[in-house]
Image: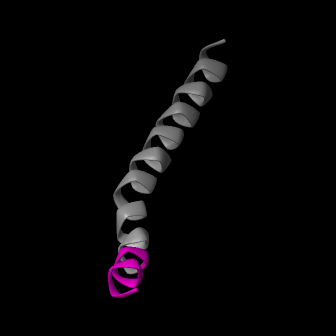
Amino acid sequence: MKVSTYLSIILNVKILLYMINENYYNPVKNKPLDIKYKKG
């Protein structure tokens, strides 16, 4: 049981880090689109 809970904690942390990275990098990806819309 201890090993499975340890693995589930690692999975949860990885998912959290992935979500945080997406939140940080998505605005950077969307900025060129904003520039295109402003020029248009």
In-front residue for pair 39/20:
39
Quarter location, residue 30? bottom left
In which quadrant of the rendered image does the N terminus lie? top right
Quarter location, residue 2? top right
Question: Residue placed farthest to the front in the image?
Answer: 40
In-front residue for pair 2/16:
16
Q: Which residues are magenta?
A: 33-40
Q: Is 23 placed left or right of 18 in the picture?
A: left
In which quadrant of the rendered image does the C terminus lie? bottom left
Q: Is 1 placed left or right of 19 in the picture?
A: right
Which residue is rendered at x = 34% and y = 57% of the image?
24
Can you say whether 36 is above or below 7 in the image?
below
Name the magenta segment's main secondary structure. Answer: helix
Which residue is rendered at x = 43% and y = 76% of the image?
33
> Where residue 7 sits: x, y (%)?
61, 30
Q: Is 22 placed left or right of 5 in the picture?
A: left
> Where residue 11 sits: x, y (%)?
58, 35
> Where residue 26 sits: x, y (%)?
42, 62
> Where residue 27 sits: x, y (%)?
36, 63
Can you say whether 25 is above or below 38 in the image?
above
In-front residue for pair 34/7:
34
